[in-house]
Amino acid sequence: MLESGQSIPSSGPDREKLREKGQFWTPPWVAEAMVGYLLAGGHKSIFDPAIGAGAFFNAAKSLMAEGASRIKLLGTELDPKALKQARQNGLSDEDLAAVEIRDFISDPPEGPFEAIVANPPYIRHHRLAAHTKSFLKSYGARLIGSALDGRAGLHVYFLLRALELLADDGRLAFIVPADTCEGIFARTLWRWISANYRLDAVVTFSPEASPFPTVDTNPIILMLAKRPPGREFLCAMCEEAETPELKVWTLSGFQTISGNALSPRRRLVSEAVSTGLSRAPGNGTGDGPTLSAFATIMRGIATGANDFFHLTRARAEELAIPQEFLLPAVARTRDVPGHELTEQTLDELEAAGRPTLLFSPDGRPLDRFPGAVQRYLRYGEDAGLPDRVLLSTRRPWYKMEVRPVPPILFAYLGRRNVRFIRNLARAVPLTGFLCVYPRRNEAQFVGKLFEVLSHSSTIANLAVVGKSYGGGAIKVEPRALERLPLAADLIQRAKLAPPSEQDQLTLPWGR
Ligand SMILES: C[S@@+](CC[C@H](N)C(=O)[O-])C[C@H]1O[C@@H](n2cnc3c(N)ncnc32)[C@H](O)[C@@H]1O
């Protein structure tokens, strides 16, 4: 396990173990600022439901050493080994005397608590056991009146449990991944929170100032009070790592700004809840229709085994696979560097030894394929492909997903390179891309739509619908991309008319 401030391994089994337990420690400059918010409320005890190596207890001790009055330290932690680490980090038996080893979610302490601070375990939903997921779901439904979508991770339920245990007038500071405000469940969650608690402030971080630079997550600090909800809250982006300014600001009750690392602004709670608290307020360029008026979106083809189905030309020739079972296909966004995918791009990929052909068998019985295809499929069976996760759900295992050729692709995950790509090579994309199917087929309409989509203001709006990760990376899912707002003046200038129902009946992709 790691000490506070120590760097986190970027790959390998250590990082895997940390992922399972959700053990990423909060650095002191952030922990002190979060505890500072609680102390500014006049509270004399803090409760940390997931104390780990003790970052917040140590922060409270530092603030006491700097003159804050005595603070009682309370907490829970699931993993006794983490407390050993807390001791190594300078916490004494006395500091840890009121820490209980227990599961904060399924076996919570009695409460209520006047001040709660946490960096809850960040365990995404797909890493949770099925029985844990169903327990969390029914707990959430009981508390807020409707179940949250199953994609809410453990950290979301930590927040709910903590809010439930917060005393009247109490304060809570949580550092959580931005998906807490951007995930599909976020609206339901935030409608309940903003109707029952007062949101005082939210802090986001520029990529350079991330408290967890080696973890692929975009963290956000939430500061909430159990008081009547307000209309506005303060929203600040921290632009400098290690800055003492953050702590000065929270300890002063948000009165003192001591430098240039923070520029807090007031923001309407209602606007922020509908935009997503972690996203900047809408900048007015998305005042037209959404992309769904002009196109539908689907994810690229999931082969279930790219190493078997995505072939180089040389490999396809060696296997003697007939042309009718091969389609031009691209897998990785970095294989298409620019805004156009052409025959030349495919030739260059081949020259670099990259696969460009999708082996795409249909669902006929194996012995009805030509001999070469039969041989290759049998080779796949011997190699255990039918047991691979996705392929084991297909009938037969080799029946490939089918996509019409999309005229526009979208590279949906990236830092600076989320972008639309004109597909002039008539290739099908694998899951590294989304397929954009315009609602009209004529080249002119597709060209104009592409022009609107490539505009910098459209690209900027991706932040409104995407989910943010570490280092400024953003990921946009198919349904979210359909909600991408487009600027009315851009559409007007491009003379892009919304298609009629009649137009859509004749589309080659059948919608
Ligand atoms: C992200 S770490 C945060 C530790 C520390 N507060 C900090 O910020 O550095 C989360 C901690 O939660 C603990 N944890 C995970 N599930 C828990 C549960 N159900 N109840 C209590 N603690 C839990 C993990 O063992 C881990 O130490």
Image: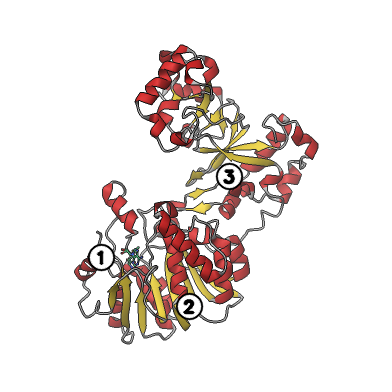
Amino acid type at mark 2: Phe
Q: Nearer the viewer, mark 2 or mark 3?
A: 3
Q: Which residue is mark 1?
A: 82
Q: Amino acid at mark 1?
A: Ala
Disc 1 to disc 3, how far (Cα)?
40 Å
Seen from the viewer's position, the closer of residues 181 and 35 is 181
Above or below: residue 350 compared with residue 488:
above
Residue denoted by label 3: 478
Q: Are marks 2 and 3 in contact (CB under 8 Å)?
A: no
Residue 257, visible in the rendered structure: no
- Circles 2, 1 touching at the beta carbon (< 8 Å): no
Relative image position of residue 354 (x, y in whole percent)? 42, 26
Q: Relative to 445, is 423 on the left or the right?
A: left
In the depicted view, which residue is nearer to us: 338 or 414?
Answer: 414
Residue 447 on image: x %, y %: 68, 34
User: What label sits on residue 254 in the rendered view?
Assistant: 2
